[in-house]
Amino acid sequence: MINPETHEPDSPHVRVIGPPRSGTNLIKYMIETHTDLSCWFNHGWWKHAVIPPLMHQGAAVSDSTPTIVLFREPVMQMASFYKAARQGRIVLSGGKDLKSFLRSPIEMSMNGDYKYTYASPVEYWCQFYFAALNWKANNRYFVDLDKLLADPKKMRDVLYRIFNFRGSTWLPFETPREYIGLNSDQHISRGLVYEDTTIDEEDKLRRAIVDELEPADLALVLSDRVAGVYAELTSQSCI
């Protein structure tokens, strides 16, 4: 619960942010099933929104909440992003396949409460991570989702770094077989949502989508601008 006086969660907590399908729900699952910590998505701002500019020193964006910023290889991120857009919930796009999706404007919203629009998903990706990299906070931690999936035990290393080895009794970190869907700031014990597929099946579908891309499509994603941001993300990753 959010304390009405401090405007922060009462229990030890960590904020997790990232673009749609970057692994935010998976990280919430890993944290809340293996530790005594709570994971918050929308404390201060929506987890998928570009980090807002700091207008007041007392604003939530400048609080002491440690923040995990998830990222992954850009082409795979775009394929996952496209799959989220096909659901038509958080991301709206006129793109009918990944090729046209990469070239179409997108609109993003949370329950219709507010909306954001970007010239393309690549532009959103660049803005999101450029803002995160230049956020003047000493308590934000970049995590490479692909490396974490390859070795889930690295989640322990990330949290040890954040919380100074607090929680030595945490369980060994594992990932679920099922693909985790939409979740809120409620603890996962109160309503974890799974989709009708597995993580392995999702990965195969994503790779099949990417295999259809042509060199011009890949060049659109892997521009010098994207490559520069991705290189900086990699250099600052905790794992």
Image (tube, rainbow, N blue to C red):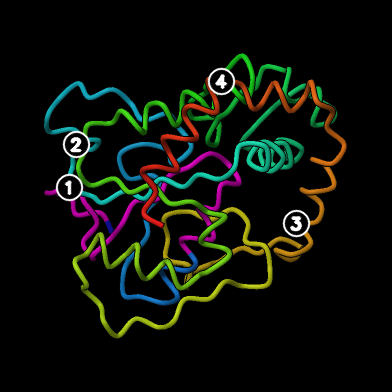
Give coordinates of residue 43: x percent, y percent: 32, 45
Q: What's the distance in space between the residues labelled 2 and 1, CA to CA?
A: 7 Å
* Residue carrying label 2: 62
Q: CA distance from mark 3 to mark 2?
A: 36 Å
Name the image quarter holding the C terminus: bottom left
Which class describes the residues within 10 Å of circle 4: few (<14), some (14-19), or many (20+)?
few
Q: Disc 3 or disc 2, which is closer to the eye?
A: 3
Is the residue marked by circle 2 packed among few (<14), some (14-19), or many (20+) residues within 10 Å?
some
Q: Give the mark nearer the N terminus: 4 vs 2.
A: 2
Q: Which label is found at residue 224?
A: 4
Which kind of residue does numbered mark 3 sit on?
Glu
Calculate the distance from the C-alpha at mark 1 to the C-alpha at mark 3. Answer: 35 Å
Does 126 sit above or below residue 6? above
Give me the residue at 37% from left, 27% from top.
131
Quick check: marks 3 and 4 in contact, CB under 8 Å? Answer: no
Instruction: Decide if residue 197 is on the left or right side of residue 71.
Output: right
Asked if marks 4 and 2 touch (Cβ < 8 Å), the reply is no
Viewer-closest of 101 and 106: 101
Q: Which residues are magenta?
A: 2-28
Find out whether residue 18 is within the magenta segment: yes
* Magenta span dominant secondary structure: loop
Judged left or right of residue 39, residue 55 is left
Q: Which mark is residue 202?
A: 3
The residue that appears at 55% across and 36% down in the rendered structure is: 111
**Toward the viewer: 106 or 78?**
78
- In x, y percent, where is residue 97? 84, 30
* Residue 193 image-quadrant placement: bottom right
